[in-house]
Structure formats: structure tokens, C-alpha cells
Image (spheres, rainbow, N blue to C red):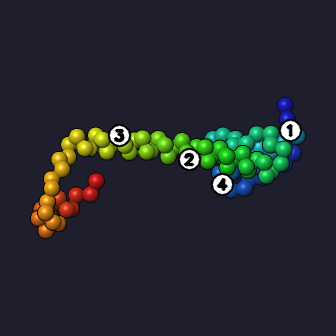
Amino acid sequence: MSKTIKHEKLTDTLALTERNDGFWLYDKTRGMNLSMSAKTEREAFIKALDYYQRRLISNELALDNLRSKVEGFVSLFVQEVEYGSSTDIPSTVLEVNI
């Protein structure tokens, strides 16, 4: 088992620990180590950024997928009406924000 050499609280939610097997970066908000046994502090932070980049891409894809499904569902209940100009559109229609 590795031994703690130095523990540094970077923010209320981030802590960097130097152990005899490397650097560990812990994120309290995620409840997990973002990097483990990194050879340098810099490598620990790069691993953390890489994790968050991959997580962001995954979440953005999930959001796009969900948005597409919601728009498809809403379109089942919305009828398209063609109006000549915006003055011909009833004011109640102009106030609706989806």
C-alpha cells in the first residue's frame, strides 16, 4: 500500500495528494480520483482534463439525442400553419416559446 507524502487541498472540492507511487487528484463533487499514480503533478492535471473532456463529449451527445427525441415528440402535437405575414398570426401563437 502506498504512503502519503504530502496532501494539498487546492479548492473546497479538489485535493492533490503526493504518495510514494505518484500523484492522485481527487474531486469531491464527483466523489472520485480523477487521476491515480501520475508521475508528476502536471500529468495528474492532464489526466483530469482528459477525463472531463471525454465526459463533456458524452454528455453533449446525450443532450443532442434527448433534444432530438423531445423535438420529435413535440412535433406530433404541433400543426404547421402557413400565414402570409406575422400580422396574420394570432397574438397567442406569437407568445408561445418552446
C-alpha span from label 2 to label 3? 20 Å
Name the residue tied to disc 4: 12
Determine if residue 90 is in view: yes
Of pointers 4 and 3, the one earlier in the residue sequence: 4
Tell me the residue that label 2 is attached to.
Answer: 56
Which is more N-terminal, label 4 or label 2?
A: 4
Please tell me whether mark 2 sits on a helix, a strand or a loop: helix
The mark that comes first in sequence, 2 or 3, is 2
Residue bearing mark 1: 21
Determine whether label 2 and label 3 are within 8 Å by CB: no
Separation (CA) of disc 2 from disc 4 = 22 Å
Where is residue 7? Give x, y as percent.
80, 49
Report the mark closest to the observer, 2 or 1: 2
Camera-near label (2 vs 4) is 2
The three-letter code of the residue at mark 1 reads: Asp
Note whether residue 7 is visible: no
> In the rendered image of this protein, does residue 29 appear above or below residue 11?
above
Q: Is residue 39 above or below residue 12?
A: above
Where does label 3 land, which residue?
69
Amino acid type of the residue that numbered disc 2 sits on in the rendered structure: Leu
Measure how far apart labels 4 and 1 are at the Cα level.
25 Å
Comparing 31 with 80, the one in front is 80
* Residue type for callout 3: Lys
Element type where label 3 sits in the image: helix
Distance between the alpha carbons at the discs numbered 4 and 3: 38 Å
